[in-house]
Image: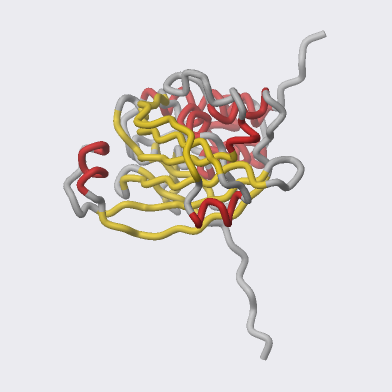
Amino acid sequence: MSQFVPRYFEIEQTLRGRAARLEPHSPLPSEAQLCDEFGVSRMTARAAVQRLVQDGLVYRVPGRGTFVASSRANRTAGHILSFSDEMRRQGRVPSSRMIERRERRATDDEERRLGVRDVVVLRRVRLADGKPIAVERAVFPADRVGDVLDQDFENESLFGALVTAGLVPTSGSAALAAEAATAEDARLLRVRKGAPLLVERRLIRDQDGEPLEWTESRYVGTRYGIDVDFDVELPTS
């Protein structure tokens, strides 16, 4: 029996492919044109486009239409994918370059957050289509990850390895800050020293609520962004 594929998903995947082949700011079909092309309702066409907007692949201009976003990688706040999945959703090719992999004694801050004295540290440059996007330092409890991290994480998914080992990244919290690129950041990310970086520090917990990963990601501000959905709290008086 063939598997049912929702119509909005079919449209979404078609548009992802088209957007990946177009230049930034190129127009995409209107909702009315999508309705005619795929024989769907306006609501279905809108749902497909909205998923691309949420992933930062396209943007809308009221009264003008929908356009291919620039190559800056965006994700929605409150929703964390692996870097590799983020890039693939945008039609880009993810890769990594390993800088450091070692076990060491935890710093005071790492011990407080992870609850262990010994940690395994992975530092990588994260790239999309060969362009450096971020320098990432991920710290794990040494007694929990065991041999899980003894793999080729320049080409393989770290999240995937953790899940396979029964350590499922499930929830967490993060803080964002704007910082200037250090000399090392500049060298690794191919930017000038002092260039603006978006720095995210996050604690990820596993399916049992136990601390699994403490990560600092230093993103090039012009190549990565985080979109925010929010509710407006009305005044009480």
Question: Percent x, y for residue 130?
Answer: 31, 25
Q: Is residue 50 visible?
A: no
Picture coordinates of residue 186 (x, y %)? 21, 43
- Of 116 and 12, nearer the camera is 116
| Quadrant of the snapshot with the N terminus | top right
Q: How many marks are shown on the rendered structure?
A: 0
Front residue (pair 81, 103): 103
Residue most extreme to the bottom: 237
Q: Residue 27 is drawn in which quadrant?
A: top left
Residue ID at (72%, 28%): 166
Identity of the residue furthest to the left in this view: 192
Q: In which quarter of the image is the C terminus?
A: bottom right
Q: Is residue 127 left or right of residue 142?
A: left
Residue 229 vs 223, above or below: the answer is below
Residue drawn at the location 51% of the way across and 43% of the way down: 53
In the image, residue 187 sits, relative to residue 162, either above or below, namely below
